[in-house]
Amino acid sequence: MATLLSWKAIRSFLKLKKADGSASISQLFRWSRQKQQLKNKVSLLNSIFDFLRFNKKNWKAVVLCLFAATIFWFFNALNKNYSANINFPVSFDYDRENYVPVKSLPAAIRMNVSGLGWDLFRKSSGLKVPPLVIPLERPAEIRKIVGSTLPALFSTQLEGLQINFVITDTVCIDIDEKVRKKFSLTVDSVWRYLHPDFGVINDITLVPDTVWIEGPRKIVNTLPDVINLALPQNNIDSDFIGEIEIIFPNDDLLKRDTPVVEVAFDVEKLMEINDRVQLKVINVPPNLRAAIDVQEVNCTFRIPVSLVKTLSIDSLTAIVDLKAFKTGSNKVVPQVNGLPKNAHLIKVDTVQVNF
């Protein structure tokens, strides 16, 4: 009986062992298959990374592929219709011989247009784009052009594009008739440019002493008949000769013929003189007698040193002219006559006149 039980036990153990072995083999097979699938996936990823990795072998191919794809996408996109806001260059057609702009004319107009991507790209890039022409029959009479009136002018000038609307609301222009006028030249108040101890001893020479100015009528007519020139230096203490450019406001709109003037003059050291000169009253009203307490007034002036020896104080006269004065008490500054041409009056005493 014991032997029979032992034999059954052995058979049961062997069946259990066989079942366990079969289970282990099946599980091992599944693990092996999963491992192989994982290896295949890793290998595929490695292949992709190797292809995308920039190295000496494949970086050129990658760049060429990306470039080709970009070009293909770009060309394909440009074959479609789009709308865009674009700045178009403009020019104004008018009689340039007889008219001239007072202010810079607008260089571009912004519009919304529709068309193929190729046409829009070419227009927006500005490559060989001819300007749109705005004709002006009477340029001096036009100050504003409303933007909504422009599509009719531009419709035949924009090949391949359709104007949807003009973004620029108003085009402002300022064109005037061109005129040519002759002006005299001078150096006014030359003493401002001299050293305080020096003065001019001869006439200032200008070559030429006139200039022709050409430009817009409204600007040329505002210029004075005599144009004052400014010297390029200060504290001049020696004879001067130099070229001076004729400059005035709105210089960029005006043409000068000639633009440069030669200026020359001689200077000399000055001497200050203080002396008394005879007083004289003129133009006294009839039947009235002017009452003046003094017969001489104190006078201070400066003259070139070379003229001091030839100066005669007796040749100087302080004049009081009563022609424009009313009766009563008046304080008057006399006018000193007889001073040398290049003398500079500094001070003269006032006198009290009663009549």
Image (cartoon, rainbow, N blue to C red):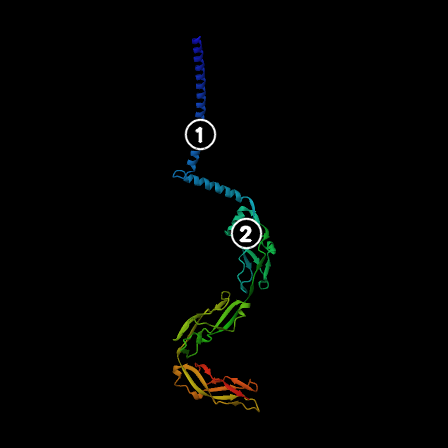
Residue 286, placed above or below residue 112: below
Q: Position of residue 208 (x, y in %)?
A: 45, 73
Q: Residue at x 42, y 81 (%)?
A: 302
How far from the left and from the top, in percent, is residue 289? 55, 91
Q: Residue 279 location in percent, x, y?
A: 48, 88
Instruction: Say if 67 sits above or below 190 in the image.
Output: above
- Helix, strand or loop status at disc 2: strand
Q: Determine which quarter of the picture holds residue 262.
A: bottom left
For mark 1, give the secondary structure.
helix
Which of labels 2 and 1 is toward the front?
1
Amino acid type indicated by mark 1: Leu
Amino acid type, label 2 = Ile
Q: Where residue 204 is drawn, which disc sits there?
A: none
- On screen, residue 285 versus residue 206, left or right, reads right
Seen in the picture, residue 153 relative to 282 is either above or below; the reply is above
Task: Give the residue at mark 2.
Answer: 86
Up-down: is 253 above or below 316?
Answer: above
Residue closer to the observer: 275 or 235 = 275
Q: Which residue is mark 1?
A: 38
In the image: residue 163, left or right of residue 74: right
Considering depth in this image, is 180 or 74 the residue closer to the camera? 74
Q: Position of residue 188 (x, y in %)?
A: 47, 75
Q: 275 or 303, which is in the foreground?
A: 275
Whether residue 272 is visible, yes or no, is: yes
- Farthest front residue? 2
Residue 339 seen by the camera: no
Q: Kindly identify the residue that appears in the image at 44 percent across and 83 percent down.
A: 300
Query: Which quadrant is the C terminus positioned in?
Result: bottom right
